Image: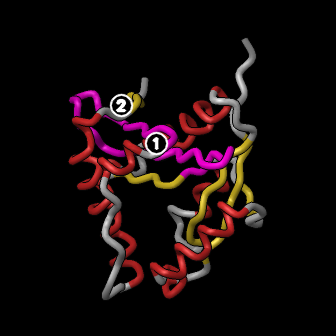
Amino acid sequence: MSSFVVRPAREIDAERMTLIEAEADQMLIALFQADEWPAPDSAADRLSMPGVVLVGESRSGEIAGFAHLLEIDGHAHLEQVSVLPRFGRRGLGRMLVSSVLRVAGARGHRDVTLRTYSDVPWNAPFYLTCGFVESEPDTAFLKGLLDVEERLRLSLYGRRLQMTAPAEVTSG
């Protein structure tokens, strides 16, 4: 039995989600010894974007992580996965990613893309174990994400890459 349940985010979760992303980002900031790092997106903005935000809630009712599936121009893109470090390595990140793949399939998508760091253990190596493989941006939306990353100067801290996994299509 899992220690977490994944459910759609509600507006009341927004403030907590912003704090989760900020705390999770501290792991990257420490790893990269980054002097500057982009601030977390507003969770209220996330909740208003097309797509779905899922939260992972502990048995005690604490929101411990979230995943944001962005749907734009027919694409399903895993925009963000953040888990509080103290809840790390307990399977919540994997549960969130698996849930996103199921939701994407249920919403008619064939695959899900994401952008991440290639050499950070909880980035590309983790996503490989979730069924993602390296892929190339092949649409205006996906190529536009390269420009966003450049503006945020994310490449200063290592190689960025796109990955794609098949959405989980359920029969029924």
* In the image, residue 61 lies in the stretch drawn in magenta: yes
Span of residues in magenta: 50-78
Number of on-image labels? 2
Q: Secondary structure at mark 2?
A: loop
User: Looking at the image, is 157 positioned above or below residue 43?
Assistant: below
Q: Are marks 2 and 1 in contact (CB under 8 Å)?
A: yes
- In the image, which disc is placed on residue 31? none
Mark sitting earlier along the chain (2/1) = 2
Q: Residue at x 48, y 83 (%)?
A: 153
Type of amino acid at the residue the image marks with label 2: Ser
Q: Position of residue 142 (x, y in %)?
A: 67, 62
User: Looking at the image, is 140 positioned above or below residue 81?
Assistant: below
Q: Is residue 6 left or right of residue 102?
A: left
Q: Position of residue 38 (x, y in %)?
A: 36, 74
Q: Residues within 10 Å of mark 1 (few under 14, many from 20)?
A: few
- Residue placed most toward the observer, 121 or 118: 118
* In the image, residue 168 lies in the stretch drawn in magenta: no
Q: Examine the image and state in which quarter residue 25 appears.
A: bottom left
- Residue pointed to by mark 1: 91
- Residue pointed to by mark 2: 3
Q: Residue at x 47, y 54 (%)?
A: 80
The C terminus is located in which quarter? top right
Q: Residue at x 39, y 28 (%)?
A: 5
The N terminus is located in which quarter? top left
Q: How is the image coloured?
A: secondary structure
Q: Position of residue 34 (x, y in %)?
A: 35, 85
